[in-house]
Image (cartoon, helix red, strand yellow):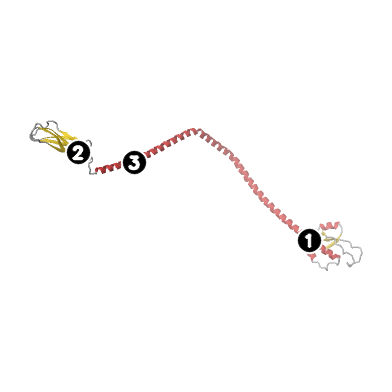
Amino acid sequence: MYKQAEPARSPVSGPGSGRTSGPPPQSSTVHLSSSTGRVRYGKGASDKRDEDQETSHTYEEAEAVKRDATYTPADTSTGGAGSRRALGSFVRSHRICMAAATAVVFSLVAVGLAMMLFINKEEMSKLSVTVDDLKRDVDNISQRDPDNERNQAAVMECLGRMNNTSEPDQAMKVQMQRLQTMVADLAAKDQKGQTEIVGMEETIQALKKEIQALKQRPYIERCESGMLKTPLAVFVTGRGGRSLGLTARFSRAFRTTPVVTLGLRQVDHRLGGIRVSATLVYVSTTNLTVQVSTWSNSQLYSASVYWMACA
């Protein structure tokens, strides 16, 4: 690429410059060529447009810089021509570096934009998939709405039936609670009765043991007594041995056979010998029998026998 360099100035004339006074040399425009690496001098806008149209790649400009750097002082002319070449070479190398840096920045920006475009495409594809899923969910929800309405109607109908039958059910619940209370009371009473029965059985067993112990005791439990009397003039007639049995019954039965004691309480007879006896002929837990006797020619009007039974 051709770029216009700064115009080179001629050395200042003066006593120390080594040159004579005279008309100053005309300033000429310095143009750099990236294709040939040489410095050309020229004037006019047409040359500038031609040089601008001969733009080449950045790498060719770098090659031109290298070729310009290899020039030796022998290749340049003396005086102002050498100074202008050095200044043009510096400006050209600075602009080439700036162009290379700008190209690198543009390439990085292009890569970043490409990556952002790729990422945006991926996100757009994911968003489209998500939108499709949402559409399907909305369709499913809209299809489930009639089912939900039917289920809600069925539930409301069931609740209405429950409200209609709530009063009988409540009365039945009250009756059931009463029955349960009665059953609980009966169970408690039955338990109490069972406990009382067990207590009574224990008491009976204790009494039986006590009775058995009393039966085995050697002392007398109780005694009863009474008097037996013969009829009048029963033994007035007759001679020889004569007898009569008299029976007495106890007020209650004895636990064991009692021991009986007899005694004549009264004897009525005529003058002469007195012949009379009283004998225990039978005894049990409920009664006893005493036999009154006389003999020979004794005439006995009556006799009384006292008895006592203990067991």
The disc at residue 94 is 1
User: How would you rate the neighbour count of disc 1 (Cα within 10 Å): few for under 14, some for 14-19, many for 20 or more?
Assistant: few
Quadrant position of residue 196: top left
In whole angstroms, how far apart are the C-alphas of marks 3 and 2? 38 Å
Kind of residue at disc 2: Ala
Circle 3 SS class: helix
Tag in front: 2 or 1: 2
Q: Is residue 34 visible?
A: no
**Do tag 1 and tag 3 residues touch (Cβ < 8 Å)?**
no
Q: Nearer the viewer, residue 129 or 179?
A: 179
Q: Nearer the viewer, residue 236 or 199?
A: 236
Q: Which residue in the protein does label 3 denote? A: 199
Circle 1 SS class: helix
- Vertical position of residue 160 compared to residue 114: above or below: above
Residue at the outermost right position? 22
Q: Which residue in the protein does label 2 denote? A: 309
Q: Of the two numbered discs 2 and 1 on the same chain, state the one appearing first in sequence.
A: 1
User: How would you rate the neighbour count of disc 2 (Cα within 10 Å): few for under 14, some for 14-19, many for 20 or more?
Assistant: many
Kind of residue at disc 3: Gly
Tell how many labels. Answer: 3
Going by the image, does 22 lie left or right of 238? right
In whole angstroms, how far apart are the C-alphas of marks 2 and 1? 166 Å
Tag in front: 1 or 3: 3
